[in-house]
Amino acid sequence: MFKKLVAKLLDKENPQPAGSDGFFLDVRCTECNAQFHLFIHKSWELSQNFEKDGSVTYFLKKTIFGVGCPNRIHVEMTFDSNKNLISQHIENGEFIED
């Protein structure tokens, strides 16, 4: 039983954690070309923004840095009320698209 649980947790063919509401964010540093592969949990990492009309949108502000990367990459993303991406902006880096 324990082996089956560990196998499910380490399943390399499932790129997104099971039961999670999120997405992968892939960015590259423009200074040293270091690449970062982050999983963003929409349920935990997005902040609410209450609009004047009473609706709710969401935003993400993230600073990314690595061990060998001297740069700080700043990412800002906005999402609609259904947590669908509306816009994204990055400083000191670039988004890596598949």
Image (tube, helix red, strand yellow):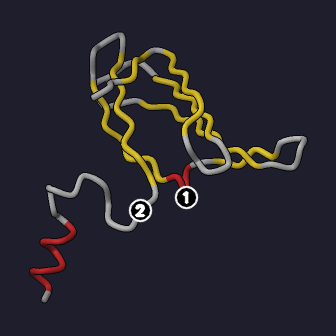
**x%, y% of residue 34?**
27, 22
Q: Quadrant of residue 24?
A: top left
The CA distance from mark 2 to mark 1 is: 8 Å
Residue visible at 38% across and 67% down?
A: 19
Q: Residue furthest right?
A: 52
Q: Is residue 46 left or right of residue 73?
A: right
Q: Pick the quarter of the image with the C terminus.
A: top left
Amino acid type, mark 1: Ser
Residue ID for mark 1: 43
Q: Pick the quarter of the image with the N terminus.
A: bottom left
Label 2 environment density (alpha carbons within 10 Å; few <14, some 14–19, many ≥20): few
Amino acid type, mark 2: Ser
Residue ID for mark 2: 20
Judged from the image, the secondary structure of the residue bearing numbered disc 2 is loop
In the rendered view, tell whether residue 54 sits above or below residue 19.
above
Q: Residue furthest bottom?
A: 1
